[in-house]
Image: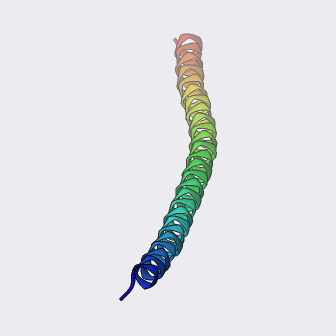
Amino acid sequence: MTDKERQIEEAKRAEKRAVEENAQLAREQAVRKASLAREQANEKASNERRSRETEKRAAEELGQLARDQARRKADLAREKAILDDQAARKLKDKTQS
C-alpha cells in the first residue's frame, strides 16, 4: 500500500469516525430530550395530582365543618329542650304545691 492509499484509508476512517461521533451525539441528544420530556410530564402530573388532592381536602374540610356545625346545633337544641322541660316541670310542681 502506498502512502497515498494509506492517507486515503486514514481519511476514510477519520470521516467514518466523524460520522459515527455525530450519530452518537444525535442519539445522546435524543435520549436527553426524551428524558427531559418525561421528567416534565411527570412534574406536570405530580402538580395536577397535588392540586386535585388539595381541592379534595378543602371540600372534605368544608363538609366536616358543616357536619360539626349541624351536630353543635342539634346538641344545643337538645340541651334547650331539656332545660325547657325542666323549667316546665318546676313551674308545674310549684303550681301544684
Viewer-closest of 38 and 68: 38
For the point 48% across and 75% down, the residue is 11
Q: Give coordinates of residue 48: x percent, y percent.
A: 62, 52
Q: Is residue 32 left or right of residue 1?
A: right
Q: Is residue 40 left or right of residue 20?
A: right
Q: Is residue 3 left or right of residue 86?
A: left
Viewer-closest of 12 and 91: 12
Q: Which residue is most to the left?
A: 1
For the point 58% across and 19% down, the residue is 92
Q: Quadrant of the N terminus?
A: bottom left
Q: Is residue 67 above or below residue 79?
A: below
For the point 55% across and 51% down, the residue is 43
Q: Give coordinates of residue 65: x percent, y percent.
A: 59, 34
Q: Give coordinates of residue 87: x percent, y percent.
A: 57, 16
Q: Is residue 47 above or below residue 94?
A: below
Quarter holding residue 66 = top right
Viewer-closest of 1 and 45: 1
Q: Give coordinates of residue 35: x percent, y percent.
A: 51, 61
For the point 57% across and 61% down, the residue is 33
Q: Which residue is most to the front?
A: 2
Quarter holding residue 70 = top right
Q: How is the image coloured?
A: rainbow
Q: Is residue 61 above or below residue 16?
A: above
